[in-house]
């Protein structure tokens, strides 16, 4: 049912790397032949490759000449020549592998190689990146290369109309976000269902029908930040919602009553956590308390099961959700902060009454509850392509999971220059207050040396807290908490200037290089500080990878405290409290750094299991529905999960 991996076939990671090295030698031979060509001759050579691809020649046979054309054209149009390691990466990506390229190694330029090769067939090639700004930026940067070789480039932006999207998808190469690609896929499915057409083949059901859809055949996709999209966000489906017709007055009343009564409930007497679903369940005593509690007249007709559900969502909000961590308030509305990248998730809403529970706690107007009209996960989207590949700076730790779920190898691409990053010893403190004081002092010491400092925090509120501390001691700095993606990229790009101090959420600015300013390399380069471990070690690795790009010098240090969230998440509230109490009695934190890594490992292992169950369940369900002749993306069952829409 899924698209083929590629027309190349798949072997082991080592075998793929060896093939890529052999391809590099062939590219170098082809490049010697092209050096004396005029620009017009390069264009004619590109047209010849397009003709051969459309006639059915294997892309593997066309790869050396195609890559040599892109390399030569990039040198002429942009003054940038692909490094040998970028040719290796491009080959791996063209063959449908996952390629790990370290931060600063030039993924955008490397991506031009497989995009060009797969676009030669005339069926299109898509690049999915983190946000609209990066999609537009990368498309404009690479456009001179593709245009010189006779290929058109389109960009999908979130505010586009259907006819604009259709034109962008009709281009040879299309840049956009996975979210926009997925929602366009779902909207086309909904459109197809109205015409009685199932599966992606509806794009080929005649011109009069295809004109109603925005996407063409899903041919080739290259996924940037692949670990974030395919692993971290695996449990969050893309959903097209429709509002339910429940009484707004009743919805408002039950949500507000749940927010009011939650303060009277105690754990574990009235409610207990459910580790399988990461939610909370009322105990029999808690349900009895709900039934006996006085209620306003507006709730007289509501079912008791709905009251239980509303209270359980209110408990979840009270226990786990904090403003400027999981969400922010903008213009009187609850706006989600993506927990994996620290960015604002505009247009997304929690489902199953959770969004309304947060609105009730914050005293905001209660919005209508929505149900799903269509949904899919990013994995399901990319598995629909004939061929897809992914790249990121932090893929190797997830290689086993990627292979088990997607059945393709993850290959590490060598560095263009040796890494000169110094990892300073972790610092562990008894309390968060002591930790923040030490962080401020290290920022002061390093910045006074003239070195730039980048500090990563896990949430918006913690970046704001550190900013206040720096203001108190007179340390000039900029705050990057990912509220505006355009300024995010601009600020992160300037974070390498002499003496600059930048406070950011851990993932903010991902996709933008930090270049060192004049004289900074001689001073020791960029110093990166982590303020606590993330639940995924790959995000910590991404943060440390900001320092020492492309052979530059740099350093990194992690600061930890015994009240960091990762200990409770990994060991549980009771065990983490015991660890903290024992250390407090000893007044000694030596040897405790390994405990934080162990807790992080427990959390990551648990999440990996949840992701495997999700994808396996989704695949089984899709097989069953398709065997019945039903569309698995439109036959949606709303369940008790708190997914996003």
Image (cartoon, grey):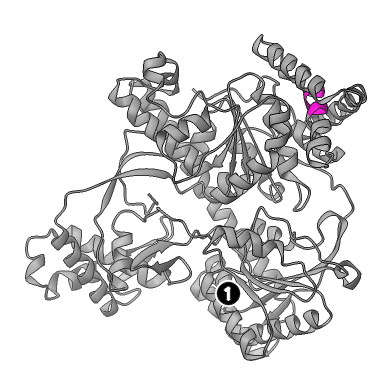
User: Is 459 situated above or below 414?
Assistant: below
Residue drawn at x 45%, y 65% is 326
Q: Residues within 10 Å of mark 1 (few under 14, many from 20)?
A: many
Residue 183 visible in the snapshot: yes
Q: Where is residue 288 shown, x and y percent of the image?
A: 18, 70
Residue 335 shown left or right of residue 260 in the figure = right
Q: Nearer the viewer, residue 537 or 516?
A: 516
Residue drawn at x 78%, y 18% is 45
Give SS at disc 1: helix
User: Is 404 situated above or below 561?
Assistant: above
Residue 120 shown left or right of residue 169 in the figure = right
Residue drawn at x 32%, y 60% is 354
Where, by quadrant of the figure, is residue 481 drawn?
A: bottom right
- In reply to whether residue 68 is colored magenta, the answer given is yes
Q: Main secondary structure of the magenta part?
A: helix
Residue drawn at x 70%, y 86% is 588
Q: Nearer the viewer, residue 288 or 329?
A: 329
Q: Where is residue 257 shown, x and y percent of the image?
A: 20, 71
The residue singled out by tag 1 in the image is: 463
Where, by quadrant of the figure, is residue 49 drawn?
A: top right
User: Is 393 situated above or below 402?
Assistant: below
- In reply to whether residue 359 is colored magenta, the answer given is no
Q: Where is residue 46 shown, x and y percent of the image?
A: 75, 20
Residue 195 shown left or right of residue 169 in the figure = left
Residue 95 shown left or right of residue 617 in the figure = right
Residue 131 visible in the snapshot: no
Q: Nearer the viewer, residue 215 or 238?
A: 215
Q: Nearer the viewer, residue 367 or 68?
A: 68
| Count of numbered circles on the image | 1
Residue extent of the magenta highlight: 64-69
Q: Where is residue 69 shown, x and y percent of the image?
A: 80, 26
């Amino acid at each position: 049912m899924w698209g083929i991996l590629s027309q190349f076939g798949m072997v082991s990671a080592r075998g793929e790397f060896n093939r890529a090295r052999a391809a590099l030698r062939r590219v170098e031979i082809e490049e010697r032949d092209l050096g004396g060509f005029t620009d017009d001759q390069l264009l004619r050579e590109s047209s010849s490759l397009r003709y051969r691809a459309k006639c059915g020649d294997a892309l593997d046979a066309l790869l050396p000449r195609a890559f040599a054309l892109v390399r030569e054209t990039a040198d002429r149009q942009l003054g940038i020549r692909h490094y040998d390691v970028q040719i290796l990466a491009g080959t791996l990506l063209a063959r449908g592998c996952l390629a790990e390229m370290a931060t600063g190694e030039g993924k955008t330029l490397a991506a031009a190689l497989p995009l060009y090769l797969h676009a030669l067939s005339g069926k299109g090639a898509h690049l999915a990146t983190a946000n609209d700004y990066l999609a537009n930026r990368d498309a404009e940067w690479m456009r001179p290369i593709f245009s010189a070789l006779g290929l058109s480039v389109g960009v999908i932006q979130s505010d586009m109309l259907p006819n604009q999207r259709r034109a962008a998808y009709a281009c040879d190469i299309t840049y956009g976000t996975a979210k926009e690609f997925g929602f366009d896929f779902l909207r086309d499915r909904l459109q197809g269902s109205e015409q009685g057409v199932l599966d992606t083949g509806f794009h080929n059901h005649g011109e009069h029908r295809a004109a109603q859809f925005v996407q063409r055949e899903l041919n080739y996709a290259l996924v940037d930040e692949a670990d974030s999209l395919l692993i971290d966000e695996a449990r969050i489906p893309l959903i097209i919602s429709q509002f339910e017709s429940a009484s707004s007055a009743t919805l408002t009343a039950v949500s507000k009553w749940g927010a009011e009564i939650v303060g009277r409930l105690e754990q574990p007497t009235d409610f207990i956590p459910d580790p399988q679903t990461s939610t909370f369940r009322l105990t029999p005593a808690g349900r009895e308390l709900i039934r006996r509690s006085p209620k306003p007249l507006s709730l007289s007709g509501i079912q008791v099961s709905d009251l239980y559900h509303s209270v359980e969502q209110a408990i979840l909000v009270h226990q786990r959700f904090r403003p400027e961590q999981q969400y922010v308030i903008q213009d009187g509305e609850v706006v989600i902060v993506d927990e994996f990248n620290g960015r604002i998730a505009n247009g997304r809403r929690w489902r199953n009454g959770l969004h309304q529970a947060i609105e009730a706690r914050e005293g905001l107007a209660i919005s209508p509850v929505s149900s799903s009209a269509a949904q899919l996960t990013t994995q399901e989207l990319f598995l629909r392509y004939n061929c897809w590949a992914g790249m990121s700076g932090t893929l190797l730790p997830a290689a086993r999971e990627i292979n088990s779920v997607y059945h393709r190898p993850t290959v590490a691409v060598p560095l263009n220059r040796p890494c000169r990053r110094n990892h300073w010893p972790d610092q562990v403190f008894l309390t968060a207050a002591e930790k923040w004081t030490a962080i401020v002092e290290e920022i002061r010491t390093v910045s006074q040396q003239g070195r730039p400092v980048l500090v990563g925090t896990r949430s918006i509120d913690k970046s704001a807290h550190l900013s206040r501390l720096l203001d108190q001691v007179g340390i000039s700095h900029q705050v990057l908490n990912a509220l505006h993606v355009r300024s995010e990229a601009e600020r992160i790009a300037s974070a390498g200037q002499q003496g600059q101090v930048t406070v950011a959420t851990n993932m903010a600015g991902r996709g933008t290089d930090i270049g060192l300013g004049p004289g900074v390399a001689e001073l020791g380069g960029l110093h990166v500080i982590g303020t606590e471990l993330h639940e995924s070690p790959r995000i910590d690795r991404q943060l440390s990878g900001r320092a020492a790009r492309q052979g530059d010098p740099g350093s990194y240090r992690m600061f930890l405290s015994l009240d960091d969230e990762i200990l409770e998440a990994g060991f549980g509230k009771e065990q983490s409290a015991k660890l903290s109490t024992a250390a407090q009695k000893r007044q000694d934190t030596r040897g405790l750094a390994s405990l934080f890594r162990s807790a992080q490992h427990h959390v990551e292992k648990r999440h990996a299991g949840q992701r495997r169950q999700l994808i396996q369940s989704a695949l089984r369900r899709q097989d069953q529905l398709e065997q019945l002749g039903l569309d698995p993306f439109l036959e949606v069952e709303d369940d008790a999960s708190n997914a996003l829409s």
